[in-house]
Amino acid sequence: MTHNGKKFFLFIFSSIIFSLGGFLLIGKVLAIDDPCASKSGSDKVDCYDSQISQLSSQAKTLSNQIAQYDAQIKLTTLKITQTQDQIALLGGRITQLGDSLTSLTAAFSSRAVETYKLSRFENNFIFILSASDITDAASRLHYLQKIQEEDRNLLEKLQTAQTTYEGQKADQETLQKQLQSQKTLLDNQKRDKANLLSITQNNENTFAKLRDEAAAELAAVSGLGKETYLRDVNTGDIIGNVISSASGCSSGRHLHFEVHNGSSVEDPNNYLSSISFTYSYNADQYGYYGTINPHGSWPWPMNQPIEVNQGYGSTGFARDFYSNKFHQGIDMDSGSSTQVRAVHSGKLYGGSYQCGGRYPGTLLYAKVDNGDGTNVWYLHMIPQ
C-alpha cells in the first residue's frame, strides 16, 4: 500500500470510528424508556419508523399522541446526526481531493510548458538530429513519445480528479440542504408538541373534548346529519347567525366554512376573495393552526373585521385532533356581527348532528347547493 493509500485508509477508519462514537452518544441520550436505544444505523431508523406506525394505529389518547411526537423527534434527531456524519466524512474527502487537484494542476502546468517547448517541430528535429548515432536518435524519439504519453495520462488524472471533486462538492451541497430540511422538520415537531401540551395543558379531558369536536365536524359534513330545504338564496343574503357560545361539538363561538365540489373537498382559499384579516394566535403558532391566502372572487360569509381561528389543510392541530389529519375548512369569527351570509346563490338547507362526548348537544349548520356542482357548508350556526 502506498503512503497516500495508508493515509486515506486511516482517514476512512477514523471517520467510521467518529460516526460510531456519535451513534453511541445518541444511544446513551435516548436510552431512557427508548426501545430503539440499543440499535444503531439503519436498524435504529427502522425501529423508530415502526414505533411511529404502531403509535399511529393506537387509540388516540393524549399520552399516545405525545409518545408519537417523541418518537418522531428522536427519529428526526437521529437522521440529523447521520447527515452531519456524512457531511463530515465527505468534507474530509473533498479536502483530500482538493489537495490532490492542486498538486496535479501544478505538476501539469509545469510539464505542459516543457512539453510545449519539446513538441515544437524545430525543437524535436534538432533534438533528434543532435543524436550521436541512429540508436541514440531512436532512443530520443522514444523518450519524446513517452513524455507525451505521460502528459496525456497526467491530463486524464487531472480531469478525473476535477470531475470527482465537483461531484462530491455537489453531494455536499445536497446534504447541507437535506440537513437544513431535517432541522426545520425537527423544529416543527418540537413546536407542535409544545402547542399540543399548551392547548391541552397535559389534560386528557381537554384533549378528548377537542377530538370529539373535530370528529363531529367531519361527521356533519359527511352528510350524516338531518337536513331540511329552507329556501333559495342570493349572494349576500343573511342565512343565519353564528352561535355566540359553546354548543354541540363546539368549544366556543366560531364559523367553520367549507367548500365541496362533488365528492371532493376544495380549498376555500381558491374561492374567497382577498381581504384584510387577523389571526387569533401569534405568528409562532402559524405552523400549528395554519394560515390562509384567499385569492378567489366570492365575498366572505361574515362581516369584517375577520379573525381566523384555524386555516385549511394538514395543520399541526389537524394532525393532533382530526382522524384524517386534515382540516377541511377555515374557522373564523367576526368582530362586528354574528350574521352569516351566503357567498353564492343557491338552495339553502338547514341541518343538524347530535353530539355526545365532551360537548353534548346539537351541532347546527347551513348548507347551500350552488347549482354548479359546488356546495358550501357553514357549521356552528343557526340557519334561518
Image (cartoon, rainbow, N blue to C red):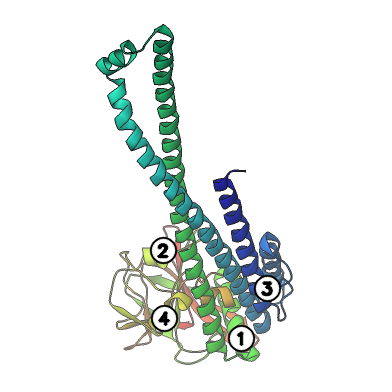
Look at the picture and state if 271 lies above or below 166. below
- The residue positioned 56% from the left and 87% from the top of the image is 197
Circle 1 or circle 4, nearest the eye: 4
Residue 377 position, x and y percent, is 47, 72
Q: Nearer the viewer, residue 162 or 31?
A: 162
Locate the N terminus by quadrant.
Answer: top right
Front position among marks 2 and 3: 3
Point 63% across, 80% down: residue: 66
Q: Amino acid at mark 3?
A: Gly
The residue singled out by tag 2 in the image is: 370
Report the label total: 4
Instruction: Write down the residue under mark 3.
Output: 27
Compared to residue 155, the image places residue 309 above or below, namely below
Quadrant into which the C terminus falls: bottom left
Mark before the other along the chain sequence, 3 or 1: 3
Measured in 3D between alpha carbons, the distance from the residue under mark 2 to the one under mark 3, in whole angstroms, is 58 Å
> Which is nearer the eye, 6 or 226?
6
Q: Does 100 appear above or below 21?
A: above
Residue occupied by mark 1: 207
- What's the distance in space between the residues labelled 2 and 1, CA to CA? 36 Å
Q: Are marks 2 and 3 in contact (CB under 8 Å)?
A: no
